[in-house]
Amino acid sequence: MAYPEIRPADPGESGVRALILAQLEYGRAVSPPEDAHAFEPEAFAGPDVALFAAREGEAVLAIGALVRLDDEHGELKGMHTAAAARGRGLGRAMLTRLLAEARGRGYRRVSLETGAMDAFARPGRSTKAPASFPVRPSPTTSAARTACT
């Protein structure tokens, strides 16, 4: 079996939209309302958003996006892997693809905000740790703000 292909995605495609909605549902279930900052599906269609999906054939296994904050700074958003595809390294593969996209766009800094609650400890922070994302408390929320420069 070949490793899943990661390529640009359309948030309106049913499999991509399903993972966006799964990520929203998960985040809302484990986060206080004031700390839920995930994008709605329509926001992934914006001009400053590069959305990607990992696929095996037609099956969408994981998603992730890079959002332009300014000419030198992007933020990771919406990283989510389908439950049946977890444990295969798709989160790290998606992170690698998103960071390559950031380099290609000339970003000097990439940030992400992931929940500080225990529910985010393994899926969020452990995937990003090897990419040199130091974890710092966010000054405005209970989330953990991280940045890779």
Image (cartoon, rainbow, N blue to C red):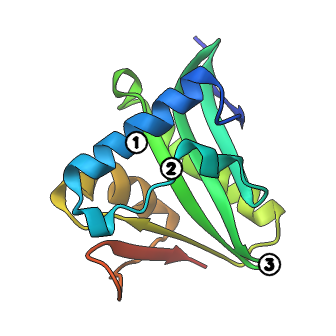
Q: Nearer the viewer, residue 132 or 122?
A: 122
The C terminus - image quarter? bottom right
- Disc 1 marks a residue whose amino acid type is Gln
Q: Nearer the viewer, residue 104 or 22?
A: 22
> Which of pointers 1 and 2 lies earlier in the amino acid sequence?
1
The residue positioned 27% from the left and 62% from the top of the image is: 33
**Image disc number at residue 14:** none
Mark 2 element type = strand
Q: Where is residue 27 drawn, in percent x and y?
A: 31, 50
Q: Which residue is mark 1?
A: 23
Count all numbered tags in the image, as a single digit: 3
The residue positioned 55% from the left and 31% from the top of the image is: 17
Q: Where is residue 64 drawn, in percent x and y?
A: 57, 46
**Image disc number at residue 78:** 2
Categorize mark 1 by other alpha carbons within 10 Å: few (<14), some (14-19), many (20+). many
Q: Picture quarter containing residue 75?
A: bottom right
Categorize mark 3 by other alpha carbons within 10 Å: few (<14), some (14-19), many (20+). few
Mark 1 element type = helix
Q: Where is residue 61 drawn, in percent x and y?
A: 51, 26
Q: Which residue is mark 3?
A: 71
Mark 3 element type = loop
> Which of pointers 2 and 3 lies earlier in the amino acid sequence?
3
Vertical arrangement, residue 90 with respect to residue 66, above or below:
above
> Which of pointers 3 and 1 lies earlier in the amino acid sequence?
1
Q: Residue furthest left?
A: 118
Q: Is residue 96 visible?
A: no
- Disc 2 marks a residue whose amino acid type is Gly
Instruction: For the residues labelled 2 and 3, say whether their Cβ atoms are less than 8 Å apart.
Output: no
Instruction: For the residues labelled 1 and 2, say whether their Cβ atoms are less than 8 Å apart.
Output: yes
The N terminus - image quarter? top right
